[in-house]
Image: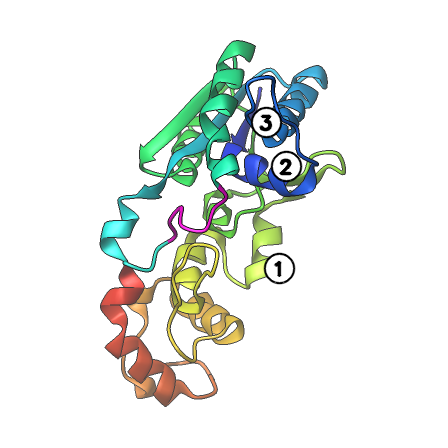
Amino acid sequence: MEIYLVDGTYELFRHYFALPSHVTGDGEEAAATRGALGYILGMLESGVRHLGVATDHVIESFRNQLWAGYKTSEGVDEPLLAQFPLFEEGLSALGVACWPMVDLEADDALAAAAAFAREQAAVDRVYICSPDKDLAQCVRGERVVQLLDRRAGRVRDEAGVMERFGVPPTSVADYLALVGDKADGYPGLPGWGEKSAAAVLARYGRIEDIPLRPEAWDLPARGADKLCRVLAEGFEMALL
């Protein structure tokens, strides 16, 4: 059995900016909904039978209480936001499992579903249909993978995560905490770039296990003194 878990928020955004406007008889913009539902229909027509879609019914989540700069719906076009309920209704009409998230995020639903599915003996493979960097932490071997391009069959397995980030999936969250993620609105720690974060995490695995004294590091790293100082000063923020 193969499980497909779709990032509905990503699909709505992708089609909103890729397709020309389409207005319904009621005067509602619906191009993104048509495009995203077309993508789902294409999956069903290709033989996909076990499918779930998660959406950010509300963009804001509990993480906005943890970090004031975390992503919000501010700046998102209203005609796009208005299509989330329409898309969710369309999925229900198709009989497709839909998880509209409030307080939690679509990524949380996809991660939970992937973790549950990989524990089921009947499941051969789980495809997380999203290029989102956050979801790379869910990849496990070749059994739980990110589907980056369905038509081209391009996937990111555990080896692909290592190639892209320089760390295994279990360290991706720590990696992003150090280098930052503009899409989600958190800045990372000053001076921690992709190479330094990958090198240090490849050795220590987790932020909590990185020594805060440079003389305790047992790997060569440029600017170790500064990296340690910045990490010590921003340790609590990095753990968020």
Q: CA distance from mark 3 to mark 2?
A: 10 Å
Instruction: Assign the N terminus to one quadrant of the image.
Output: top right
Q: Residue at x 47, y 39 (%)?
A: 78
Classified by dominant secondary structure, the portion drawn in magenta counts as loop
Please tell me how many numbered marks the rendered image carries: 3
Disc 2 and disc 1 in contact, CB within 8 angstroms: no
Q: Magenta stretch: residue 72 in it?
A: yes
Q: Is residue 121 above or below residue 94?
A: below
Q: On the picture, is 67 further left or further right than 113?
A: left
Q: CA distance from mark 2 to mark 1?
A: 28 Å
Mark 1 and mark 3 lie on one chain; the one further toward the N terminus is 3
Point out the stretch of residues depicted in magenta.
Answer: 71-77
Neighbourhood count class around disc 3 (C-alpha, 10 Å): few under 14, some 14–19, many 20 upward: many
Q: Can you identify the residue that label 1 sits on? A: 163
Query: Which amino acid type corresponds to the residue marked 2 in the rendered image?
Result: His
Query: Which amino acid type corresponds to the residue marked 3 in the rendered image?
Result: Ala
Mark 3 and mark 2 lie on one chain; the one further toward the N terminus is 2
Residue 15 numbered tag: 2
Q: CA distance from mark 1 to mark 3?
A: 38 Å
Secondary structure beneath dot 2 equals helix
Neighbourhood count class around disc 2 (C-alpha, 10 Å): few under 14, some 14–19, many 20 upward: some
Q: Can you identify the residue that label 3 sits on? A: 30
Q: Nearer the viewer, residue 231 or 200?
A: 231
Residue 32 numbered tag: none
